[in-house]
Image: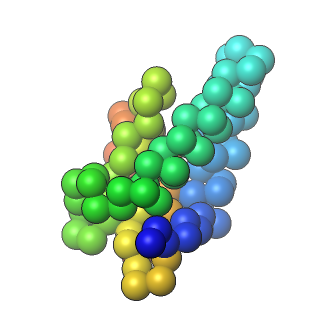
Amino acid sequence: MSLPVTLRPRAEADLVDAFAWYEERLPGLGEAFLRAVDASLTRIQRHSEAYPEAHPRVRRAPLRRFPYGVFYVIRDDRIDVLAVYHARRRPRRFES
């Protein structure tokens, strides 16, 4: 049984910012970014423990095609996505 995936407000804000940045560079690229995130969330839901811990209890699933990672925590009843972060940015402290 797979757990539901929830996005924290910070992760939602990350998606909005990244979408806008990519869409500004090339129309349609923001949509491609969101599709890559959606595919990653599906993989996380199906195989949540397949990705390594990047921080204590916080796992990182890389996106395909884009230099971003989805940072998440596995709870008893859900998977919480904490952030969607660019690989070259210095990670902020995660509130898990």
Residue most extreme to the bottom: 76
Observer-nearest residue: 91 or 5? 5
Question: Residue 51: x and y, percent?
Answer: 28, 52
- Quadrant occupied by the C terminus: bottom left
Residue most extreme to the top: 26
Is residue 46 toward the left or the right of residue 38 in the image? Answer: left
Is residue 57 toward the left or the right of residue 63 in the image? Answer: left
Image: 93 above or below 95? above
Observer-nearest residue: 4 or 62? 4
At a point 55% along the width and 35% down the height, the residue shown is 36
Residue 46 appears in which quarter of the rendering? Answer: bottom left
Image: 17 above or below 45? above
Question: Residue 11: x and y, percent?
Answer: 57, 58
Residue most extreme to the right: 27
Image: 51 above or below 56? above
Is residue 72 toward the left or the right of residue 29 in the image? Answer: left
At a point 40% along the width and 80% down the height, the residue shown is 75
Task: Identify the image's colour scheme: rainbow, by chain, secondary structure or one colour.
Answer: rainbow
Question: Residue 52: x and y, percent?
Answer: 22, 54
Observer-nearest residue: 12 or 40? 40
Would residue 94 be seen by someone viewing this image from the given angle? Answer: no
At a point 46% along the width and 59% down the height, the residue shown is 45
At a point 59% along the width and 44% down the height, the residue shown is 38
Is residue 13 toward the left or the right of residue 40 in the image? Answer: right
Q: How many marks?
A: 0
Would residue 66 be seen by someone viewing this image from the given angle? Answer: yes
Image: 33 above or below 74? above
- Quadrant occupied by the N terminus: bottom left
Question: Residue 53: x and y, percent?
Answer: 23, 59
Residue most extreme to the front: 1
